[in-house]
Structures are given as C-alpha cells and as structure tokens.
Image (spheres, rainbow, N blue to C red):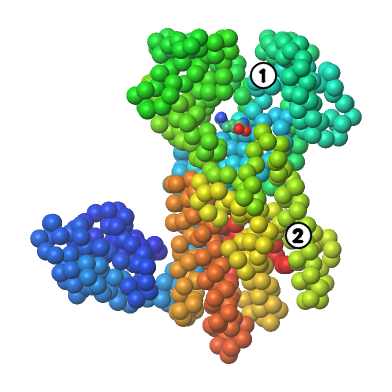
Amino acid sequence: MDFKNAVAVKVAEATGLDVSEVNRLVEIPPQEDMGDFAFPCFVLAKTMHKAPNMIASDLSESDQMSAEWLSKVEAKGPYLNFFVDRGAYAKEVLSEVLSKGTSYGQSEEGEGKTVIVEFSSPNIAKPFHVGHAFTTILGHSLSRIYEKLGYKVVRMNHLGDYGTQFGKLITAYRLWGDEEALEKDPITELLRIYVKFHEEEKNDPELTVSARENFKKLEDGCEEEVALWQKFRDMSLVVFEQLYKRMGVTFDNYNGESYYAKMADQVVAMLKEKNLLIESEGAQVVDLEEYGVPPCIILKSDGTTIYGTRDIAAILYRDEKYHFDKNIYVVGIPQALHFKQVFSTLKKAGYACADKCEHVGFGLVKFQNMKFSTRDGNIVLLEELLDESVAKTYELIKANAETRKSDMSDEELREIAEKVGLGAVIYTYVKAGRERDIVFSWDTMLDFEGDTAPYLIYTYARTRSILRKAKEQGFEPVGSGSVLLNKLDGDEEFACVKALADLPDAIRKAAGSNEPFMVSRAVAGIARAFNRFYNNCSILGGEDAELKTARLAMCEAVCDAIETGTYLLGISVVEQM
Ligand code: ARG
C-alpha cells in the first residue's frame, strides 16, 4: 500500500479534487509533531469560499478522515496533518520490501520507452583520468536507475577516435614508436610520442605537413594508415575495457566519432537543402541567434567536418535506429554550450528528436584544490585512484580483522577491500548533486562512520551477520504479511520504516532529474536510521521472541534495500567484513 496515495485518495474523496493532483500536493512534513503526511488546503480556498485554516479544521473533524491505518488527522493552520498507525505502516512497508527483495523499487513506468545513455566517451590514446570516471560512474548509475524503472536502456560510448590528432600519432609512431613499449603499456607510449610530436613540431614544420597528409590518408581509407589507427584504437580499448570490467560497467556499443564521421556528409547535405548553411569567415555555419547561442560550425574553411557535425550525425542515426524517448549525454559542464548548439541546430532543421536530447553535466574533480585536465599533464589516472583506495581499505579492514581475531583469509580480505575501496571512490562521485565539484580526501571517503560507501557496506555486512547469528540461535525473520510486523512501532523502528518507504520515490526522482545522488541520499538515510535503531534497541536480546523475529525481518528488509540502492549506484556489498 502506498500511504501517500492512500492519504491523497482520502482527501480527494472528501473534497472532490483529483487524486493525482492531491498526490502531487501531499507533503512530508519537516517535523514529527506535524504528522507523517500533510495536505496544504490553499487550493481549496477558491472553490470552497473559505479560509484554508477553516477548511483544514473542518476536514480534520469529518468522519471521512478515519481509517484503520490512520492513528489521527489533525489541523494545524492551513495544513491537514495525517499520522499513520505505526504498526500498520511497518507491516505494509516491510511486507512490500520483503516480498520484492532486491526488486524493491522496481516499476513499469518506463515500459516500452527507450533511453540512450551516452557516457564515459574517453579519447583514444589518452589516459583515462578521474574526470572520465565522473561520466562513467554517473552514466553507469543512471543506466541502472532507468532500467529499474522499466526503461529499455542503450548504453553508448561515444569514443573520441577521430580527428587530426590521429594524423600526428601516425607520423610520431613511424618516427619514434617503440613496439615493445606499446605492447606493454599502450596509452603511456602513445602519449609519450604524442607529446614528443608537439615538442618537435615547434622546430620542424615538416612534421605538421606529414601529420596533415597522414590524416588525409586516414580519411581517404588508405590501408596502412587505417591499420595503424585501428591498432591504436584496439589497444586503447583493451585498457579502457579492463577498467570497465573492474567497475562492472558495460556498453551496448562503442560507436565513436569515427563511426559518425562517415555520416557527416549527409548532415551537410541536409542542412544545405534546408538552406540553413551560411558562410562565416570561410566556414559553413548554422545561425542560432533565435536560440540565444553562437552559430554552430558545420564545415571548417578547409572543408572538413568537426566534432559538432559528428554529434549531429550521431543524433540522426540514434533517432532512426532506436526511436529514443530520451537521449542523454553525461558530459562535463564545459561542453554545455556545445550541446546547446548541436540540439538547437537540429531543432532549427525541424527535427522533433532535438527536444528529447539532454545534456547531463557534472562538475570538476579536485584533490586538495588542484584542478586536473588532460592538457596540463598533471592528471590523476582513475586506475591510480582505485588502486590507492583499495590498498588503504585493505590496511583498515586488516587491522580491524586482527583486533576482532577474525579468521578471514588474506584472499578474502583482499576481495572485500577491492569492493569497498572501489565503492568508496564511486560513492564520492554520487553522494552530492552532480554539478558540484568533488574534492577527494582519504579521510572523508574511507570514514566508516561518515557519509561513505564503507559505512553503507559495513552496515549491510553487520546486519547480515546478525541474521546469521540469529539463525544459529534458531530465530528466523518473519515473512512478508506477518501480523508480527505490527509490533515494530517504536520511534527508531518507525524512522527506519519511513526511510525504507522513501526509496522507491527517490529512485523515480533520480531518473527525473538525472541525479543518482537522490538514491545515495535515500540509502544513506536507511543506513543511518537502521544504525540508530540498532544502537537503541536490542535485536537478539530481550525476552519477546515474536518481537525478535519481527526485528529480524526489519534487518532483512534493510539489507535488501541497501543492496538495491548500492547496486543502482554501481557499488557492491559484501557479506562480511
Ligand atoms: N571524447 C570527449 C571528451 O573526452 C567527450 C565526448 C562527449 N560526447 C559527445 N557526444 N560529444 O572530451
């Protein structure tokens, strides 16, 4: 039972308003003494010709406001406050979680709809740094969130595998390439020769000419140049895919810029036919003044297409192939204008799909106030960050295992450290609104008591261990629908049940705003509420065996919810730690 909706139904029945409208208006009051749900009566003032306060007061006294699941309905100013019956509420919510397990929060609202999530999209032959991790982690999480809501999700990796830099790489490779180094560590070697090219180019204009020629050959499909480009691409992908595998990230395709470059001519032809191309300083552009953005360049003065042209081609391709309902781009905020230009160009050209495209931007990644970007050479690789986090986590849990005289093997500890260490990094990216900059700090992200993945995972593992211990003592949690769940009506229990009930709505809101942090906040809320309950109420102690089995059911529900929520964020739980 959806209590919020049940409240809405009651109000709708008593007032003649539409249920879905009331549902939208029902609030969760900020303070406990204001009840569990509140309906602001302002909307009724006009039709009822009464002051909102009066309306609230009259409604609170009406017979229609009683139900076995409501303990009381009170008027406070213009608000009608609903207090649910805690026992009934606990039974409803916990039964729902227990019957669904890790499918809790799943819905069909996306049924029959397709969402394209474009994310990660690193550049070939360049290091995979912490900025790429931001799009990778957000996109991975959003994909899972949409799937949870029943959408068909297409995960696309728009690789940066095209452009004049590949002409430079081919020239550089022929001059200075070290085959052995390339095999061993392809990206480092490709970066080395790329940097060297730029240094040498300053004194040797021949290099510039050669690079341009090689790029032309690549574009024309000359065998040797294409083979080299393919080799760089394949080798880079091997490195990227290792990282993806480690993080459990998958893609439906890696159609990168080179894939759409082949379709750029069609974009030019289409825009020409619609008379949208105008000349500006030798280049062909689409004027976008009516959209309040600078013109979108389609063809450079030398007649070659650019990044934006390929993005336009990609949208037309995606629209035709997938008939998407949403096409989202998880790309840093600095590219916001670029996407505005691309979407506006398509809109001006009359494509309805332009309105279904959305740029999902995110902030910068910082380490002690340093800004990292591929260009300044001062970059932090994602792999380094993950390795370091795992190593530090290993030390922490090892020390802990020693204190507890745990019999976990070193192999087990390392497996746990890998999951928790990765989780700590991932959580740092999704714990706040995506447009905010992230500041990494070991102390914060590995704090087992803080707003961190280790805290969530630890809560999960400890709760699992309570369930195991209970089983040994012969106590099993009661199942979904059990009347014993009505016993869970204490303050801490009620808070925990409420936190559990919030998760499905948080998942929906996360999709609506493309903000995974809505999920992380809800899961953290569950863990915090549960820990307060754990610290204040004895689960396995006490005489009341029925209460014990009901509390164990709450433990199980909390585990299901934490596992569900962390999965949506791309974080794995562990059974013990
Ligand atoms: N490869 C680009 C970069 O690393 C990001 C690509 C974003 N996606 C797009 N469709 N333009 O900056």
- Marks counted in the figure total 2
Which amino acid, by three-letter code, is at mark 1?
Thr
Tell me how far mark 2 sits from mark 1, CA to CA: 41 Å
CB of mark 1 near ligand 1 (< 8 Å): no
Q: Quadrant of the C terminus?
A: bottom right
Which amino acid, by three-letter code, is at mark 2?
Lys
Residue 421, quarter of picture: bottom right
Please give left or right for residue 302 compared with residue 347 in the image: right
Displayed-image quarter of ligand 1: top right
In-front residue for pair 98/366: 366
Rendered location of residue 391, percent (x, y): 78, 57
Q: Where 203 sits versus 83, above or below?
A: above
Is residue 253 something that shows in the picture? no
Q: Where 214 sits versus 498, above or below?
A: above
Q: Residue furthest right?
A: 180
- Residue at 63 percent across and 79 percent down: it is 475
Q: Would you call the spot at circle 1 few (<14 residues within 10 Å), some (14-19), or many (20 or more)?
A: some
First along the sequence among labels 2 and 1: 1
In-front residue for pair 26/70: 26
Callout 1: helix, strand or loop? loop
Rendered location of residue 547, percent (x, y): 53, 82
For disc 1, the marked residue is 164
For disc 2, the marked residue is 392
Callout 2: helix, strand or loop? helix
Q: Where 345 sits versus 98, above or below?
A: above
Is residue 88 something that shows in the picture? yes
Rendered location of residue 75, percent (x, y): 23, 73
